[in-house]
Image (cartoon, rainbow, N blue to C red):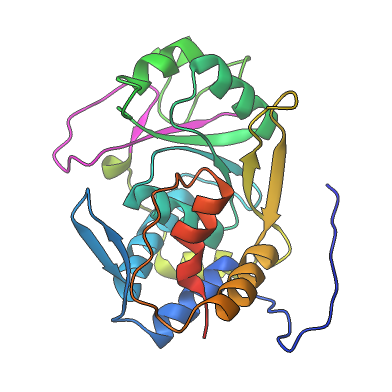
């Protein structure tokens, strides 16, 4: 991995925090301030509520045995679960791999292999993709015969966990080889999450994006915690006043623009 920095004079020094620490800071300073609204889901989050949900997601990831530096493929549309997974993965040192939810099975397999994902999170249906599960069956027939968390497919050697996210709290959907998010037994605590967060270096990768492939095969690009935290603090701090009213972000968050504007800008410290 190549690292690069562009140095210039500035009145604002760089901040050395990881994304999880940045979220903790915002929750401590503004716990009751609203930070996210999902109109389609009829959900609203304050910083305290978001922090609580993110911590629960992080506990699930630790309970499944994910380690610092593991890649987690997120094959979801722009939903509250996607935002929570994004921040939870960063909290426990995973590298979120942003995947277009309309990828075909072949494209998804290529991206999973290229990024070396250990986990994949998906939902059953995404707009034009009526049945993501059928795409996963094409991706790996082994899912039909293995236990959840024990996928051993020679065509996908790094992939171990496949996790289904559902809006239905009473879901009875059960597939061999697939975890259902609501049914995962949590064996870690918030203290475990904080202990893991303290191990995450701010210059370690936080996420991976894929280029569009217009000039050849899509390429993976990693962005660090350091880059994310300083981008939102430097750019948004100069362009916007504190707690400007509302920002509508219809851009998918598997794009870098949607990722930074829909997710990470709420972590800007004033």
For residue 231, side relative to residue 121 (left or right):
right
- Outermost residue on the left side: it is 170
What residue is rendered at 54% in x and 41% in y?
Answer: 98
Q: Is residue 183 left or right of residue 206?
A: left
Residue 122 placement: quadrant:
top left
Whether residue 253 appears in this view of the structure is: yes
Residue 127 spot, x, y in % from top left: 31, 28
Instruction: Look at the picture and state if 53 lies above or below 166.
Output: below
Residue 241 percent coordinates (x, y): 47, 83
Stretch in magenta: 157-180
Q: Going by the image, does 173 lie left or right of 269?
A: left
Going 44% across and 84% down the picture, which residue do you hit? 242
Q: Is residue 31 above or below residue 166?
A: below
Q: Position of residue 18 (x, y in %)?
A: 62, 69
Q: Residue at x 33, y 75 (%)?
A: 245
**Residue 211 or residue 181, whichever sits in front:** 211
The chief SS type of the magenta part is loop
Q: Could you tell me if residue 176 is visible in this image?
A: no
Which residue shows up at 43% across the image and 51% down it?
Answer: 85
Q: Toward which corner of the image does residue 44 lie, by quadrant?
A: bottom left
Residue 172 among magenta residues: yes
Q: Residue 42 versus residue 70: which sits nearer the camera? A: 42
Nearest the viewer among 182 and 102 is 102
Q: Is residue 64 magenta?
A: no
Q: Position of residue 16 (x, y in %)?
A: 69, 77
Q: How many marks?
A: 0
Q: Residue furthest front?
A: 239
């Amino acid at each position: 991995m190549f690292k690069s920095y562009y140095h210039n004079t500035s009145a604002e020094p760089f901040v050395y925090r990881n994304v999880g620490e940045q979220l903790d800071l915002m929750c401590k300073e503004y716990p009751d301030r609203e930070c996210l609204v999902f109109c389609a889901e009829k959900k609203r989050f304050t910083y305290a509520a978001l922090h609580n949900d993110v911590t629960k997601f992080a506990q699930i990831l630790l309970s499944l045995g994910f380690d610092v530096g593991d890649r987690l493929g997120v094959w979801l549309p722009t939903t509250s679960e996607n935002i929570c997974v994004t921040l939870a993965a960063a909290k426990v040192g995973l590298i979120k791999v942003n995947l277009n939810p309309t990828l075909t099975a072949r494209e998804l397999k290529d991206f999973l292999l290229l990024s070396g994902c250990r986990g994949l999170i998906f939902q059953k249906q995404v707009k034009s993709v009526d049945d993501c599960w059928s795409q996963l069956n094409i991706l790996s027939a082994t899912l039909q015969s293995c236990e959840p968390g024990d996928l051993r497919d020679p065509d996908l050697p790094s992939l171990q966990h496949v996790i289904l996210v559902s809006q239905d709290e009473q879901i009875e959907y059960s597939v061999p080889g697939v975890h259902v998010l609501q049914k995962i037994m949590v064996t870690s605590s918030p203290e475990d999450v904080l202990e893991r967060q303290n191990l995450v270096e701010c210059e370690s990768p936080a996420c991976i994006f894929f280029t569009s492939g217009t000039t050849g095969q899509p390429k993976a690009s990693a962005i660090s915690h350091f880059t994310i935290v300083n981008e939102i603090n430097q750019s948004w701090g100069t362009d916007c006043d504190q707690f400007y009213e509302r920002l509508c972000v219809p851009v998918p968050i598997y794009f870098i623009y949607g990722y930074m504007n829909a997710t990470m800008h709420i972590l800007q410290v004033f």
